[in-house]
Image: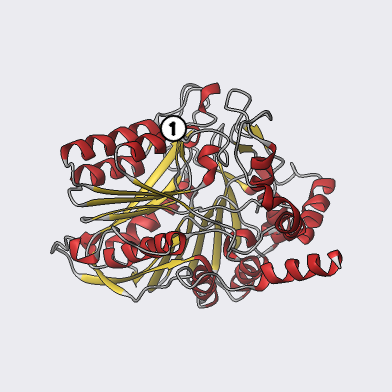
Amino acid sequence: MLLVIYIATFIRHQSKELPEELNYASEEYTLQSGEIQLLRDITINLEKGEPILDHEIFHAFHDAIQEAEEFIVLDMFMFTDLGASEGEYPSISRDLKLTILNQMERYPDLNVWIITDYINSSYESHSASRIDVLEEHGAKVVVADLMPLRDPIPIYSSFYRMFLQWFGYGGEGWIVNHFGEEEPEMSLRSYFKLLNTKGNHRKALVTEHEGIYTSANAHDQSGYHSNIGVRVQGEILEALLEAERRVVQYNLGNDEGFPTPDQLVIEELSGEEDLAAKVVTEGKILPEAMKIINEAETGETLWLGMYLLSDGRIIDALEEAAERGVMVRLILDPNQKSFGNEKPGIPNLAVSHRMAPESRDNMDIRWYNIDEEQYHSKILFLDGKTSRVLLGSMNFTRRGLNKNNLENNLLVQGPEEAVFMEDVRDYFNLLWHNPDHQYTLKYDAHQDELSWFRRALFRVQKALRLTTF
């Protein structure tokens, strides 16, 4: 009987639909060229001396917050300094907290909402210091409930749902924190919860004046990562706000007190109406990614800048695009560092070995030249007569694309000569061609670092879904 219940639980939480508030795809909005801006965090590692940080994303966050008078909605997976005690890192989370607090003091009626994940309190084993102080000053905090989402590790999560979830999570800890020995200890119940490996992975900011979607976390230890983002204004703010309202509705059962579209300030900015954009979340992201890849034509170029790439559907589509004459260029992280720990190069080294770009026409892979940081971007770009960009929080992994996380991306399309498309093209060409610094390395710089044993282990892990990707 237990086995039957286990199998039924396994199947149910792989095939179920998400709550109706999630899985959102907005209508298309027209954007003028002045209403959209590419944001890039680029870390340049030098052979000698400190790395150069050419970073824009959190500067844009601070600018947007300091302009807000009506409301701030921050949806952020990691808003913490966990793991930063063992080294010198940028004070991203502290500075962001202080900027929000200062704005709340300037405007006492400012409506602040923080939507986040249990990871910031190590699943309630300790306080989430950056977030708790904002709540004490009047911010509304929503920690996303992830149990209604699909299970990325069904072998474990089915057991967890049957036997372990009833014990709850949190409480006084006694086990070393996964962020490091210097951090507050975690309880066993919290570790049981963490091992489900799903999260509110979104990274977004919305105010009455503008919105930002990004791949960057407000996490000090991630402060050196290279990331990508987009800053928008205009009527599309309605869609960004609606995507967040749906998460609040899904978690609280109501949206009482949440900002409304009539509070948005839609400013008329100069520029031609040459772009179309839409918001896509969770399960609506994969169809858009597949459409971009599958509709790429001979002579066009597909660029992919990605922290984690492992989804077979995406990989097959990229290989097929190369076979029909599309130039496919991938910039990937070599997956050797994560929160200060060494990683074995999985999944990207194993996936690149399978794709074998050295033996394919029209396909090439370069590795971002990392040191202690990560190439954490998530962006797909079709460079063609009608160009398309898909960017945001989503890694191209089964875990991300199969409705296991809360995710948010922005899809933008328009003519190749649009300023935004030129900026995206310049971004990829800079990293690819290394005109002034060694941003990326050739494929053979890392291709031999993954042993046959690790490649086999990757295949077993992927088959059994015993992975974090």
Question: What x and y, as percent, mark residue 47?
Answer: 53, 26
Q: Is residue 324 above or below residue 338?
A: below
Report x, y in % for residue 19. Answer: 52, 70
Q: Which residue was labeled with disc 1?
A: 129
- Closest to the observer, 138 or 227: 138
**Which residue is rendered at x = 53% and y = 45% of the image?**
118
| Residue shown at the point (66%, 50%) measured from the top left | 468
The answer to whether one can see residue 390 in this image is yes
Give the amino acid at mark 1: Ser
Q: Residue at x 43, y 68 (%)?
A: 280
- Please state the horizontal and vertical placement of residue 237, each as a whole percent of the image: 27, 63
* Residue 36 place in picture, x, y as percent: 27, 59
Q: With 251 as the anchor, is 451 left or right in this view? A: right
Instruction: Indicate the secondary structure of the residue bearing disc 1.
Output: helix
* Position above or below: 409 against 142: below
Residue farthest front in this picture: 166
Question: Up-down: is 362 above or below 447?
Answer: below
Q: Quadrant of the N terminus?
A: bottom right
Q: Is residue 195 visible?
A: no
Q: Which residue: 74% across, 58% down?
A: 162
Judged left or right of residue 413, residue 357 is: right
- Name the one closer to the observer, 446 or 29: 29
Colour pattern: secondary structure
